[in-house]
C-alpha cells in the first residue's frame, strides 16, 4: 500500500522535479540522476512525510539538499577531474582560434608535467584524477590515507609551481 501511495503522489510531481533539477545542474543527465536519487531518498523516508504538508515542497527540499551535498563533494575533488589520458578531449566553450591552440599547448604541458613527477607522487595523483577515493588509493598502494593525501597535495603544489613558472 505504501509503495502505491508514494508512486501515485510522486508521479504527480515528477515533471516539476525534473525541471527544478535541470535548473540546478544545467545538464540533462545530471538532472535525471538527481531526480532518481531524490525519488530513492523520498521513498526511503516516506514514512516521515507529513501528509498535511505539501509533497512537492518536501520532495523539492530533498532534491535541493541532495544537489548541495553532491556539489560540495565535487568541489572537494581535484581541480582536474578527468583521467590524464582523456585530457586531450576537453572542450572549451567556443574558443577563439588562437585560444584553442594555447589551450592545447597548456594541456600538453600539464600532461608532460604530470609525467615528470616522481613515481611516489605521480601514481596517487593519476589514481585520484581517475576518480579513485583516498581510501581506494591507500588500499591499492598499501600506504596510509594520510600519506596518500600528502603525496597528492605535494603533486598539486608542484604542478601549480610549474604553471606559474611557464
Image: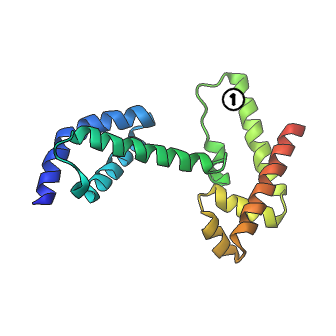
Q: Which residue corresponds to the image point at 22% horizontal and 42% vertical from the top-left?
A: 55
Q: 78 or 61: nearer the eye?
A: 61
154 relative position to 41: left or right: right
Q: Which residue corresponds to the image point at 69% horizontal and 69% vertical from the top-left?
A: 145
Among all residues in the image, which is located at the extreme bottom? 142
Residue 139 x/y as whole percent: 64, 75
Task: Name the residue beneath numbered marker 1.
Answer: 100
Q: 83 or 69: nearer the eye?
A: 69
Residue 141 visible? The answer is yes
Among all residues in the image, which is located at the extreme right? 165
Work out whether 144 lies above or below 89.
below
142 relative position to 60: left or right: right
| Displayed quadrant of residue 140 | bottom right
For label 1, the crowd category at 10 Å Cα-Cα, with few meaning under 14, some 14 to 19 and many 20 or more, is some
161 relative position to 47: left or right: right
Work out whether 52 lies above or below 99.
below
| Displayed quadrant of residue 125 | bottom right
Work out whether 41 lies above or below 67.
below
Q: Which residue corresponds to the image point at 35% horizontal and 46% vertical from the top-left?
A: 62
Q: In which quadrant is the N terminus drawn?
A: bottom left
Residue 149 x/y as whole percent: 72, 62
Amino acid at each position: 500500500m505504501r509503495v502505491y501511495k508514494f508512486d501515485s503522489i510522486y508521479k504527480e510531481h515528477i515533471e516539476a522535479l525534473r525541471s527544478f533539477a535541470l535548473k540546478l545542474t544545467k545538464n540533462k543527465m545530471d538532472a535525471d540522476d538527481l531526480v532518481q536519487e531524490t525519488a530513492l531518498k523520498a521513498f526511503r523516508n516516506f514514512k516521515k512525510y507529513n501528509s498535511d504538508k505539501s509533497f512537492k515542497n518536501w520532495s523539492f527540499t530533498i532534491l535541493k539538499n541532495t544537489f548541495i551535498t553532491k556539489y560540495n563533494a565535487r568541489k572537494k575533488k581535484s581541480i582536474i577531474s578527468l583521467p590524464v589520458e582523456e585530457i586531450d578531449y576537453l572542450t572549451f566553450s567556443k574558443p577563439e582560434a588562437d585560444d584553442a591552440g594555447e589551450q592545447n599547448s597548456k594541456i600538453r604541458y600539464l600532461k608532460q608535467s604530470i609525467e615528470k613527477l616522481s613515481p611516489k607522487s605521480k601514481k596517487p595523483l593519476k589514481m585520484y584524477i581517475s576518480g579513485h577515493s583516498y581510501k581506494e588509493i591507500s588500499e591499492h598502494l598499501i600506504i596510509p590515507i594520510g600519506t596518500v593525501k600528502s603525496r597528492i597535495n605535494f603533486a598539486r603544489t608542484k604542478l601549480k609551481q610549474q604553471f606559474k613558472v611557464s
